[in-house]
Image (cartoon, rainbow, N blue to C red):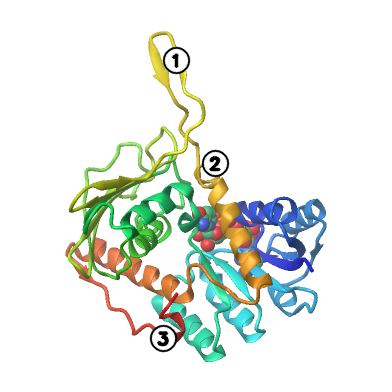
Amino acid sequence: MELAVGVIGTGNIGADHARRLATRVAGARVHAVFDLDGDRAAAIAAEVGAVALRSAEEVVDDAAVDAVLIASPGDTHAALALACIAAAKPVLCEKPLATTTEECWKVVEAEAAHGSRLVQVGFMRRYDAGYLVVKQEIDGGRIGEVLLAHCIHRNQSVPPSFTSDMSLTDSVIHEIDTARWLLTEELVAATVVPVRRSPLAAEGLLDPQLVLLEAASGAVVEVEVFVNCQYGYDVRCEVVGSTGTASLEIPTANVVTTAGARSQPVPVDWRLRFGAAYLEELQHFVDAVRAGGVAGPSSYDGYAATAVAESCVRSLKEGQRAQVTLAKRPALYETA
Ligand code: NAP
């Protein structure tokens, strides 16, 4: 039986996910969608052969919906994830799990009380072929003990509504999750270093920013986040170990050599760079649910990532190193 998915939020990524589910993910179909923008929802519903419902609650409660995909704005995620848990429906929740640690923790507690995993958080970099190779090199012991990592997260540009905090809570949160996953340990402190502002950054936006994330072992992850770099979407990562390094392979299209120069295109955005990872992420979710469970990045991972992002914001505001305090991982997530 195909998994019937309800999609809540059909903006940029929700529409992409709905199309992927309808056309490229095996064993799934989109049964229902909802978006505050009714026209947007109706257009996607018609495109993917789904019904457009009148509320998010209708999607969650629809008996024909087996699983839910949340792709509405971050501040709506916690309530919707809690509704899915109350209805015992598996849910793939886009990042962030919630915009505050308190809300994230409510989701963790509700899922732990339910007694089995229902929530996968949309940290799709864990499904990217390049990151998976870096992870295998680390786990295989081929670079020795991890000492530090250099990460770069650059966007071509951002809308005027984008804030300095969002560079940390919306962008760097991906590096926070990949750092926890690659190093298999918690991050214990964050320091945001002020950097000379790009003259092309919007009024009031601190861009770029440099973030230092300290892991429990003493390993340090350094992240440059620069959301107005102009030239494209560029994500890099090099993990430095005691006997070698592992670098993220950057997938590229063809190399063009002409007029005395060799060039490779740079993706314009995350859609292109992580297209294959989004597909793997959705397939993994669908396969796991059809097999009777949920795996992948957990609610606890979502909670921890938001907690570290909050510490980054605190460091930015207070101009000093900010510690990360995490509540104890419930038993449900001990092997997750
Ligand atoms: P978006 O383009 O603004 O789309 C969000 C959509 O949800 C809009 O159509 C919005 O309608 C609608 N909406 C607002 N409140 C809603 C509610 N209560 N119920 C249902 N729909 C609601 O945003 P986006 O870029 O797709 O981002 C959505 C989420 O995905 C965010 O959490 C974002 O962080 C995440 N995301 C993740 C990645 C990734 O790489 N994993 C990439 C992009 C986005 P209105 O416009 O009328 O408000």
The location of residue 101, given as percent across then percent down, is 40, 76
Judging by the rendered image, the residue that carries numbered circle 3 is 330
Q: Looking at the image, is mark 1 or mark 2 earlier in the sequence?
A: 1
**Which residue sits at x=44%, y=80%?**
333
**Mark 1 or mark 2, which is nearer to you?**
1
Quadrant of residue 116 in the image?
Answer: bottom right
**Which residue sits at x=35%, y=55%?**
164
Q: Residues within 10 Å of mark 2 (few under 14, many from 20)?
A: few
What is the CA distance from the residue labelled 3 to the residue labelled 2? 36 Å
What is the CA distance from the residue labelled 1 to the residue labelled 2? 22 Å
Within 8 Å of ligand 1, the CB of disc 3?
A: no
Judging by the rendered image, the residue that carries numbered circle 1 is 257
**In the foreground, 250 or 44:** 250
Judging by the rendered image, the residue that carries numbered circle 2 is 272
For numbered disc 3, what is the local secondary structure? loop
**In the foreground, 140 or 290:** 140
In this view of the protein, can residue 266 be seen by the observer? yes
Q: Residues within 10 Å of mark 3 (few under 14, many from 20)?
A: few
Q: Is residue 123 left or right of residue 226?
A: right
